[in-house]
Amino acid sequence: MSRLSCEGTFRALETYPALGRGTGHETNTFARNVDCGGNVLRPRARPHRRLAGYPVPRGDVELRLVLHIAKNPDGTLKATLDSVDQGQNGLAVTDLSLEGPNLTFDVDAVNGSYRGKVMGDGKTILGKWQQGRPMDLEFERATTPIKTQHKPGKPSDIDGAWLGTLDLGERKLRVVFHIINTEDGLMATFGVLDENPQLLPATSVTRDGASLKIEAKQFGGVYAGKIAADRSSIDGTWTQGDHSLPLVLKPVKDPSELQPKTPQNPATK
């Protein structure tokens, strides 16, 4: 066999059944982009993430990862990992090794490791990701890596922060979407203000006239709504798994609206 190269980009999509069976682990679908070598990773070992107090989704969810591998001057390999849908970039990859067709590496930040084999054509890597339990992961060489940075484009008429409230009955949770037009099209970040200040990238944003769809595959969720003619609101529904709730978004005019509410000052609208 000729010497294998660990340079380039590999992509894989691994589907796992939905959590909710008492495993205590996350189960996700991982869409992975890998620079220079098969790679795969799960998020940190913690309970499955869900939005706004919803039960764990029963459908599949996705998490895109990008592994960047390059050669050091001495010929050894180095790498970092981006978790695109968690907004975490540059996670350190350790103990990266390519011996013959065997590719191995660890990601200490998530207590995970990967053991794979590069196929003879150099286009596919078959292996297992170990993080609490082993999972099969297959990667195929891709020509276009996932972009984690997007240059701003001409602002659209819906650019900006949009705020709404999910009524869960026993409590209300404020959800914010930050929409921006880029050279690659509309993008968005989102978050639940009163649960976690961290904003996460939406998987995709699609607009067709007055119809707007924002997918958050890392939660198995999607927001679909109609944009008012005067851009004063977006009237829609948040769906996660088999649960749906109405969610009306309105443009944020005062940054103070985005401040987290304390229990003494709960969201009321």
Image: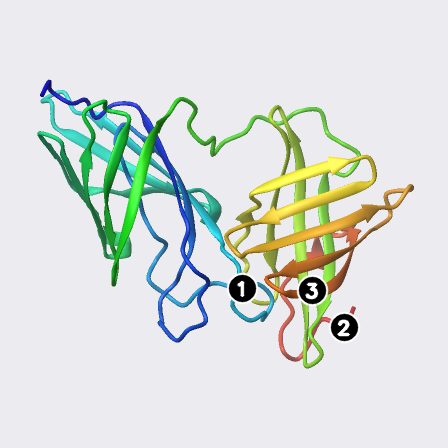
The front one of 134 and 198 is 134
Under mark 3, the amino acid is Ser
Label 3 and label 1: CA atoms lie apart by 11 Å
**What residue does disc 1 label?**
57
Instruction: Specify the label residue 219 is tagged with.
Output: none
**Are dots 3 and 1 in contact, CB under 8 Å?**
no
Where is residue 241, by image quadrant?
A: bottom right
The mark nearer the N terminus, 3 or 1, is 1
Disc 2 residue type (three-letter): Thr
Q: Residues within 10 Å of mark 3 (few under 14, many from 20)?
A: some
Q: Position of residue 74 (x, y in %)?
A: 9, 22
Whole-percent x and y of residue 148?
47, 34
Quick one: quadrant of the N terminus? top left
Mark in front: 1 vs 2:
1
Badge 2: few (under 14), some or many (20 or more) residues near its Cα, within 10 Å? few
- Label 3, label 2: how far apart the Cα atoms are: 20 Å
Q: Amino acid at mark 1?
A: Pro
Q: Tell whether label 2 touches label 3 (CB within 8 Å).
A: no
- Position above or below: 207 against 54: above
Would you name the residue on which mark 2 appears?
268
Cα–Cα span, label 1 and label 2 = 26 Å
Q: Which mark is residue 244?
A: 3
> Which SS class for mark 1?
loop
Q: Secondary structure at mark 3?
A: strand
Q: Earlier in the sequence, mark 3 or mark 2?
A: 3
Q: Please report whichever mark, 1 or 2, sits nearer to the chain's N-terminal start.
A: 1
